[in-house]
Amino acid sequence: MPEYQDVVIAGFGGQGVMLIGNLLAQAGMEQGLHVTFLPVYGAEMRGGTANCTVVLDVLPIGSPLVREPLSSIVLNEPSLTKFQPRLRKGGVQIVNASLIAQDLVETSIRTVYIPANDMAHKIGNAKLVNMVALGAWLGATGTLPLQAVQDALHSVVSSHYAKLIPVNAAALAAGYDFAITRE
């Protein structure tokens, strides 16, 4: 695991951007890391823009603000347009190939171009796009163990939705496996 990692997660409201940011932050805390989670909403929640920044570090974090992120997870085209130019040189981005044309992806950036929507449908729930993408980020960055994030689902998902934890864990694993086979 790297000593420091940050990620901007972006999409439109309803894609679960905040959920996976919260999940990643929770998993980091459970692994003993210092963590910040900074959510940003657009004018509307569902359908509007949404992004968050998560910072994970072995040392105390001075600020949750990140100008040039080391990594990003982009779930839609407007998010790619906004955050791809800000990615630090040598960074990695997870790009949802189901909603973003490949010719928009900067070829000089290390990219996992994953059909997250298509994979979520194959798993059996279209709402799992976010978990597939987060799994790919885990595989591409090695920031946290897959199992740590799967375990953190129990802390983040309310008991009312506990029956969905196994399918969310499966979606994380599918994204993770996709990313590690592309390296």
Image (cartoon, helix red, strand yellow):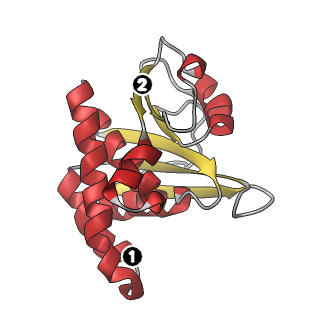
Which residue corresponds to mark 2?
A: 111
Q: Amino acid at mark 1?
A: Val
Whether tag 2 and tag 1 are in contact, CB under 8 A, the answer is: no
Crowd class of label 1 (few under 14; some 14 to 19; many from 20; radius 10 Å): some
Q: Residue at x 64, y 38 (%)?
A: 79
Tell me the quarter of the picture where residue 141 sits: top left
**Of all residues shown, which one is farthest toward the bottom?**
160
| Residue at screen point 75% across, 55% down | 42
Residue 68, x across and y down, in percent: 56, 30
Q: Quick one: SS at disc 1?
A: loop
| 47 relative to 166 in the view: left or right | right
Q: Residue at x 45, y 53 (%)?
A: 130
Is residue 171 rendered to the left or right of residue 44? left
| Foreground pick, 68 / 131 | 131
Q: Is residue 2 above or below residue 89?
A: below
Of all residues shown, which one is farthest toward the top?
A: 108
Between the residue at mark 2 and the residue at mark 1, the CA separation in whole angstroms equals 29 Å
- Image vertical order of residue 43 relative to residue 100, above or below: below
